Amino acid sequence: EDDDDDEDFDEEFDGLGIMSDMTRSAVKKAKRKKRGDADSAKGSTVYFYRFETFGKVADKDWVVALPDGERVLGCATGREWGAVITSRRLLRLFTTAGIQGPVIWIPGEPVTVVGRGRFVAAVYHRSLSPMQDGTQLLGYSLIDGINGNTIAAGELSSISPGASLTWAGFTDVCALSVMDSDGMLSMLARSPSSDNCSSDTMGHWIPMLDTVGLKKSTSDSFWPVEVYGGKLVCVPLRGGKEYPDPVRRPVTTTLPLRIPMAKGLTVKSGPLDEVSVRGNIALNQQKVLNDYLCNLGEADADALEEEYVQMSAQVDKITLKLFMQIVRTGKVERALDLIQRLHLEQSYDIAIQAADRVGHRKLSDRIEESKLQKFQPLDEDMFFDDNASAESFPRGRSESFDGNSESMMSQRELKTSQSISPEDPRTPPRGFRVMERMDGEQFTDEETPPRPSNKRKAEDVAPIKSKKRINPFAKKRLESPAKGITKTVASPTKLSLSRQSTFSTKSRQKLRDGKQIV
């Protein structure tokens, strides 16, 4: 702006004759002050250009003017909303059609505002004076851009000592991410709630990538674009440049995320440990987003749950690979701690089988206990409770018992008579008839013929066979007489002993002793 003002001043001063440099600078300073006072008296103007509309093309764009003295310091847009952050520490929300939403106070002096989807994040100064080592004291507010509800707020504690904020944005799962001047990329990790209704309002910052080790020289840097699919999309800058060249089209590259983990000296787990930790963090962020969208009714809960189960299976697969590596080394306690990262019940079963196959029976028992604590089995007593009150059953069913008591009794007698066979020792001698009361007790009546009503009811209960209609004009089907007569005899299953059984172990030991004697 100063260069443009100097050019304007030079054009105006050309017709005023010769001036000294001191007079010229004084006049420029006075004009700048006068021009600044005039600009500060008027508020900023916000222009919003829409790409698509179902109405008139002439009405798709809109313009608003802020109150006097209020200037726009940053702007962001997302799905169905737009936002500006102003010099009066206000966050103003608008719909894409131009309807003004809530106006929210920011706790400190604004730094930047970013957005994605239906979420907007405002970053502000918690204190204008930094720490003794020069570290910025910043805070953040994560807000729903449509209804203005605050989702999360707190301190932006992911700035390295002596560094400052250089970039802020959202990942593909709408997780807030920032990058400082030291090249450390961090993400706000939020955990889903236990009741699957809402998520925690707070979160903690986790370092996701340290770009210091990826630089070829100390003057190199990376200009972030976005975080997508577990990778940082950025523009590499060489020779101390701070921004890409606006004249040329920048060439982007992708850097895979990698949490700076400590190197194990006793047990070398390799990259699987870091991938397992990062996979669980990404899974939690997906769960938080799914829960929020389901609560608002903007997504199908069943479809999201099916997608979440598939993602859980992929993360558990990595965790089980790491589990097998640790079990082979004999570190059973580490393996048991790793079980807490599993999400599916089937994954627990695979871990139990793997522990039994290696021979760690105590480990498999502990995994079984953890599985029962996380996936509690259904209590069968609640379905087969003899002392259940009559109120727990539907009224319609109790009324049917009262109206059809006679028919139920006849069916019970028929069932009892059919269960008696001559080979059964419980069959009473000839001339006795077994009867059953409503309370379930059986008794015999000596030489009492069955009542004709029961016979008639038994005949009524028997299914009626439908006659098969024969077509006299149909061709007669000829079949081989041997078909259906010869039966294939199944080969008997061979019994085999497990290699881990005691008999197999002793046999192998005797075989080794015999070879040694020879």
Image: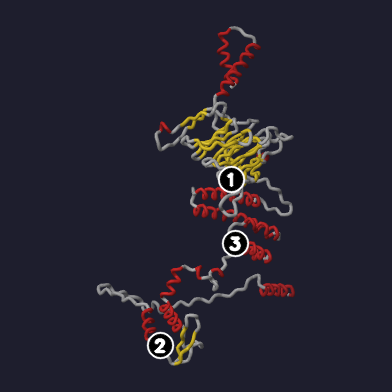
- Does 364 sit above or below residue 478? above
Give whichever of discs 3 and 1 has the lower sequence position: 1
Say which amino acid is labelled 3: Phe
Expressed as whole percent of the image width and height from the top left, the position of residue 394 reads 47, 67
Circles 2 and 1, Cβ within 8 Å, touching? The answer is no
Q: Which-is-in-front pick, marks 2 and 3?
A: 2
Q: Quadrant of the N terminus?
A: top right
Expressed as whole percent of the image width and height from the top left, the position of residue 485 reads 40, 79
Say which amino acid is labelled 1: Gly
- Does 17 sit above or below residue 162? above
Q: Which residue is mark 3?
A: 375
Distance from disc 3 to disc 1, alpha carbons, whole Å, reads: 30 Å
**Which residue is the extreme one toward the left?**
473
Q: Secondary structure at mark 3?
A: loop
Give whichever of discs 2 and 1 has the lower sequence position: 1
Say which amino acid is labelled 2: Pro
Expressed as whole percent of the image width and height from the top left, the position of residue 378 reads 56, 65
Q: Which-is-in-front pick, marks 3 and 1?
A: 3
Residue 216 visible, this angle: no
Count residues near mark 3 (Cα–Cα under 10 Å), then give few for <14, some for 14-19, many for 20+. Answer: few
Q: Which residue is mark 1?
A: 230
Count residues near mark 2 (Cα–Cα under 10 Å), then give few for <14, some for 14-19, many for 20+. Answer: few
Residue at 69% x, 39% y: name it.
160
Expressed as whole percent of the image width and height from the top left, the position of residue 61 reads 45, 32
Residue 85 falls in image quadrant: top right
